[in-house]
Image: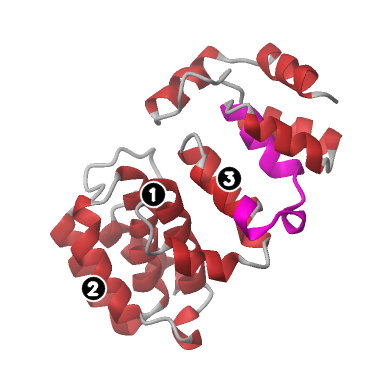
Amino acid sequence: MTVKEVLAELESLSDEARRRHNTKAGAPDNQFGVKLGDIRAIAKRIKSDHELALALWETGNVEAQLLATLIIKPKSLSGAEVDAMTRSTTCGQVADWLNGYVVAQHPDKEALRVKWMKDKDRWAARAGWSLTASRVNKGAGEAGEDLESLLDRIEKEMPKAKPEVQWAMNNTLAAIGIQHPEHRQRAVAIGEKIGLYRDWPVSKGCTPPYVPVWIAAMVKAKK
């Protein structure tokens, strides 16, 4: 498929309710409002097409970038290319798919994580914290991660961080509290002190991203 053909198909799948949802979540106007399942179906049909993925990413269209993350070959990208893609991300959903499907599979991910954890660019910092949350969930405390220092940074920086970065920092805070009982009390206390997402609306039966509630729910589920 060509970029023109892919964009035409994406546009034909536009859904106004999805577009409104995306806009409310911070997506730019360069979008069609396509359901994520429809994007996955196109990716399944295309399978892998690295050059097409790069071209789709360059359009800046939300759905085209989402599709690109599913059909790109992460190991065919240089670390510099991954860094550039991360910084050109258009919205949170794209950032999450890029981090999950591309960055997490790249051989330079740890070097990039260390770099991004010191970065002021909102998407680079979000990626750094997302990778850090993943490390914590996988037991990074035993692999040299200084969890006390992470908690210090979160307590100091999260209140004034950009919303895109706050989300990933909050995930890291929750991961520390859930995976490391020795740090749980402090993680909960930080969550209570900052109060981020305290009033976050959730559907019945779902767990909110408010850290004290999130940690309690996950710890209970483990028992």
Q: Residue furthest front?
A: 80
Query: Tag 2 or tag 1, which sits nearer the N-term?
Result: 1
- How far separated are the C-alphas under marks 1 and 2? 21 Å
Q: Where is residue 222 in the image (x, y as percent from the top left)?
A: 46, 71
**Amino acid tagged 1:** Asp
**Considering the numbered disc 1 on the image, is that residue within a helix, a strand or a loop?**
loop
* Secondary structure under the numbered disc 2 in the rendered image: helix
Residue under label 2: 152
Location of residue 221 (image quadrant): bottom left
Q: How many labels does the image show?
A: 3
Q: Which residue has dot 1 on it?
A: 121
Which sits earlier in the primary sequence, circle 3 or circle 2? 3
Give the residue drawn at x 38%, y 47%. Answer: 122
Q: In which quarter of the image is residue 168?
A: bottom left
Q: Mark 3 points at which residue?
A: 85
Segment colored magenta: 62-81
Tell me if I can see residue 187 in this picture: no
Q: How crowded is mark 3: few (under 14 residues within 10 Å), some or many (20 or more)?
A: many
The reply to whether dot 3 and dot 2 touch (C-beta < 8 Å) is no
Mark 3–mark 2 Cα distance, whole angstroms, equals 29 Å
Question: Which residue is at 84% across, 35% downward?
Answer: 46
In the image, 13: left or right of 177?
right
Q: Earlier in the sequence, mark 3 or mark 1?
A: 3
